Image (cartoon, grey):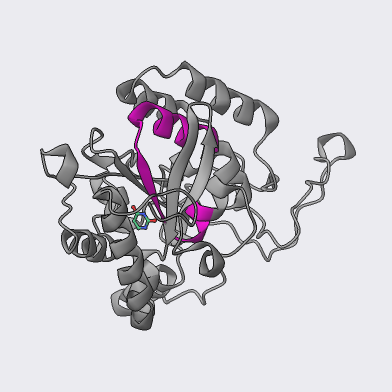
Amino acid sequence: MNAAAPEPDDPAALLAALRLQLDWGADEALAEAPLDRLAAPPPLAPSAALPAAPSAAGEPSRRAAPGRRGAALPLAAPLAPAARNAAALAAGAQDLAALREAIREVDTPLRDTATNLVFADGNPDSGLMLIGEAPGADEDRLGRPFVGQSGQLLDRMLASIGLDRAAEDPSRAFYITNILPWRPPGNRTPTDAEIALFLPLVLRHIALARPRHVLLLGGVSAKALLNTREGITRLRGRWHSLPLEAGGLPVLPTWHPAYLLRNPAAKRDSWADLLLLRRTLSGDISAAPGGLT
Ligand code: URA
């Protein structure tokens, strides 16, 4: 970030500069000392030079991780050992409590910038699982998914079809998690590499919670789980089948509640999706892709 430096003794200007950085998403300190990225790099002795880091097309270059100042790391794909380790951690988790601890162990710079792990909320016995994108600031602070503004809208939407995440009766409850368990700094969109890293853990989460139906909240979640580049506009509003070892699991993509806050006209679609969910849960219609009973 290249904001003009405020006068060191002007508290109002310092506060305004901090506010501006917050507005721009620079809300995490990644290193002890500021780093001027526009300054010319000091000359490196040839033996100390790092190989050029490959970078994914269109990916923003990564900010330096703590302790690695100046060393640009590739963002394109999870480092192979980290991805292998994540898959092994997922496979080794035999229950939800073990999975939570396994997720903590996954090697990712997101751990350095987030405050709390955001694992899941609600009733895992409910048979209905919701999967969002990634925690935001409120979720990061409280360690629970969907507790901010969009989460409150989501709770009201589900209440309108008789569902409540806190309900003890599994038939009235739901269970909710995200693709990423850590908040991306500044609420940026998760990278493909981050999604790929955590996908085995999300699939393990589904296998352990054993939902009968899944609601996918937004394009990141729908595209990741359905392994498609098709957008949420085309995916939403109908049941798809997620191929799992135990058989096909019905998943329903729908708009993310944060999108509804920005585009209230889309609530009409969401209402149709909620009715489809309600009718499917009550057995009026089948979740077979496109099918009516
Ligand atoms: N948006 C998400 O996708 N997940 C949350 O937990 C909060 C906001």
Q: Considering depth in this image, is 1 or 83 the residue closer to the camera?
A: 83
Q: Is residue 76 visible?
A: yes
Q: Is residue 52 left or right of residue 216?
A: right
Q: Is residue 284 left or right of residue 34?
A: left
Name the residue located 41 percent from the left edge and 42 percent from the top edge: 181
Name the residue located 23 percent from the left edge and 33 percent from the top edge: 125
Residue 277 belongs to the span the image colors magenta: no
Q: Is residue 56 left or right of residue 253?
A: right
Q: Residue lying furthest front in this view?
A: 293
| Residue 261, position as x, y percentages in the image | 33, 75
Name the residue located 37 percent from the left edge and 26 percent from the top edge: 208
Q: Is residue 14 visible?
A: no
Vertical arrangement, residue 67 with respect to residue 93, above or below: below
**In which of the image's four quarters is ligand 1 placed?**
bottom left
Q: Considering depth in this image, is 291 or 208 the residue closer to the camera?
A: 291
Vertical arrangement, residue 26 with respect to residue 221, above or below: below
Q: Considering depth in this image, is 268 or 59 the residue closer to the camera?
A: 268
| Residue 285, position as x, y percentages in the image | 34, 54
Quarter holding the N terminus is: bottom right
Q: Residue lying furthest right in this view?
A: 46
Q: Residue lying furthest bottom in this view?
A: 265
Total tally of numbered discs in the picture: 0
Q: Is residue 5 left or right of residue 118?
A: right
Name the residue located 33 percent from the left edge and 38 percent from the top edge: 119
Residue 220 belongs to the span the image colors magenta: yes
Range shown magenta: 198-222
Q: Considering depth in this image, is 1 or 232 the residue closer to the camera?
A: 232
| Residue 237, position as x, y percentages in the image | 44, 64
Residue 37 is drawn in which quadrant?
A: bottom right
| Residue 264, position as x, y percentages in the image | 33, 81
What secondary structure predominates along the stretch shown in magenta?
helix
Vertical arrangement, residue 249 with respect to residue 285, above or below: above
